[in-house]
C-alpha cells in the first residue's frame, strides 16, 4: 500500500509537486518523490480526455496509470508529447509511473470531466 501527497497551486489548480510513500503496516519504508526540478510535466492537469508527458529525454517510454488503491488501470508505450487516452477513466486522482532509460518517475494527476 502507498500514500500519495499532492502540492497544488490554489489559483490555477495545477499539481506542482507530488510524492509517493510506500507503507508497510503503519510506517513509511521508502519515499520516491518527483519534484518540479526533474523536468517532467503531465499536461493538462486536471485532464478530461487525454494527458501528455513532456520531459527532457526524447525517447519512447513505458507507462502505467494506477488508481489510488494501487490497481493498474492503463499501461502502454508511447513517445514524448503523444496523447494518452484517459477517456475511459472516471473523475478522480490517479498516478502515472513513467519508465524511461532505466529510471522511473511517478506523477499524480487529476481527471475532471
Image (tube, helix red, strand yellow):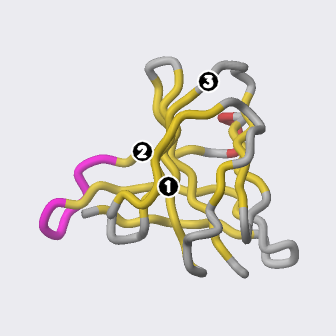
Who comes first in sequence, dot 2 or dot 1?
Answer: 1
Task: Identify residue for label 3.
Answer: 60
Indicate yes or no whether the magenta region holds residue 27.
yes
Residue pictured at 79% horizontal, 77% vertical: 10
Q: Secondary structure at mark 1?
A: strand
Separation (CA) of disc 2 from disc 1: 6 Å
Alpha-carbon neighbours of circle 2 within 10 Å: few (<14), some, or many (≥20)? few
Q: Secondary structure at mark 3?
A: loop
Question: On the picture, is 34 further left or further right than 14?
Answer: left
Main SS type for the magenta part?
strand
Which quarter of the image is occupied by the N terminus?
A: bottom left
Residue pictured at 20% horizontal, 63% vertical: 27
Q: Secondary structure at mark 2?
A: strand
Residue 40 or 16: which is nearer the viewer? 40
Task: Identify residue for label 2.
Answer: 32
Task: Identify residue for label 1.
Answer: 19
Residue 59's image quarter? top right
Q: Is residue 16 above or below residue 30?
A: below
Nearer the camera: disc 2 or disc 3 = 3
Separation (CA) of disc 3 from disc 1: 23 Å
Alpha-carbon neighbours of circle 3 within 10 Å: few (<14), some, or many (≥20)? few
Percent from the top left, x then y, of residue 70? 33, 63
Percent from the top left, x then y, of residue 36? 70, 44
Tell me the magenta residue range.
Answer: 24-30
Q: Are marks 2 and 1 in contact (CB under 8 Å)?
A: yes
Who comes first in sequence, dot 2 or dot 3?
Answer: 2
Residue pictured at 64% horizontal, 68% vertical: 87
Indicate yes or no whether the magenta region holds residue 99.
no
Q: Are marks 3 and 1 in contact (CB under 8 Å)?
A: no
Question: On the picture, is 46 further left or further right than 24?
Answer: right
Amino acid at each position: 500500500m502507498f500514500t500519495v501527497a499532492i502540492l497544488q497551486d490554489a489559483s490555477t489548480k495545477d499539481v506542482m509537486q507530488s510524492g509517493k510513500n510506500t507503507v508497510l503496516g503503519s510506517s513509511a519504508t521508502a519515499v520516491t518523490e518527483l519534484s518540479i526540478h526533474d523536468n517532467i510535466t503531465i499536461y493538462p492537469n486536471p485532464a478530461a480526455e487525454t494527458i501528455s508527458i513532456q520531459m527532457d529525454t526524447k525517447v519512447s517510454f513505458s507507462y502505467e496509470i494506477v488508481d489510488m488503491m494501487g490497481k493498474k488501470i492503463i499501461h502502454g508505450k508511447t513517445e514524448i508529447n503523444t496523447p494518452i487516452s484517459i477517456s475511459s477513466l472516471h473523475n478522480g486522482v490517479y498516478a502515472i509511473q513513467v519508465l524511461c532509460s532505466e529510471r522511473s518517475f511517478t506523477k499524480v494527476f487529476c481527471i475532471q470531466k
